[in-house]
Image (cartoon, grey):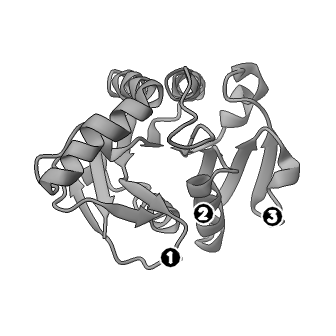
Amino acid sequence: MNIFIAGANGGIGRQAVEQALQAGHRVTALVRNPAKLLLVHPNLNIVKGDIMQPETFADEMEGQQIVLSALGVSGGLFSDKLTTLYSQGNANILKAMERHGVKRIICISASAVEISPVIPWYVRLVARYVIQKLLKHMYADLRRMESIVKDSSADWTIIRPPQLTDKPLTANYRTAVNDFLKNCLRVSRADVGHYMVNNLVNKETYKSTVEIAY
């Protein structure tokens, strides 16, 4: 398939690029700094652009069959700041998709956007009173993003991973579609990328949220 990947230099995005290429797909990778994506492959087209400036990438949507949006802000728990990267970035993607007749998109959100009732009580407390407080701006924008995506005409899937790690690919994880995943605590970026690449046209996930964890 022809796959457009936004956030291709990020942890999940980079994994999605590499695994999509390994699976034989043709990848268009959108990055702000191409020098940071040290990959060379005959099926890889690296595009320099800014997700917040749609004129820098909209034309690249022509001929694409699916979009993987792995946008993410930099920093950690103590560097939260106002952002529209998720909401406006994905809104720009959706407009470009509509213009070029692309229907399918898979987006990355986060499990703590909605506090799960089936994770341990102490994890719920940390999620609600620590994570959501320290990253209040990020989570506010993720909620705006989810609303924009859900209101679109696209065949969307929103993936909500918990704590992300840099551990290697296992391809051994659990998922829950439109439901909460028991003990949804952590998963590697490599395995999130694996799920994205292996569910490109899984209609059971269309217009659905998916939790993923070990």
Residue 144 location (% of width, % of height):
39, 21
Tell me which label, 1 or 2, sits earlier in the chain.
2
The residues bearing labels 1 and 3 have C-alpha atoms spaced at a distance of: 19 Å
Residue 18 location (% of width, % of height):
65, 66
Q: Is residue 207 visible?
A: no
Q: Nearer the viewer, residue 129 or 97?
A: 129
Residue 39 bears which disc, if any?
3
Assign a secondary structure to mark 2. Answer: helix
From the image, tell me which residue sits under label 1: 169
Q: Residue at (46%, 35%) from the top-left corner?
A: 103
Residue 179 location (% of width, % of height):
16, 49
The residues bearing labels 3 and 2 have C-alpha atoms spaced at a distance of: 12 Å
From the image, tell me which residue sits under label 2: 15
Residue count near mark 3 (Cα–Cα under 10 Å), binned few <14, some 14–19, many ≥20:
few
CB within 8 Å, label 1 to label 2: yes
Q: Amino acid under label 2?
A: Gln
Q: Amino acid under label 3?
A: Leu
Specify whether 177 is left or right of 157.
Answer: left
Assign a secondary structure to mark 3. Answer: loop
Q: Quadrant of the N terminus?
A: bottom right
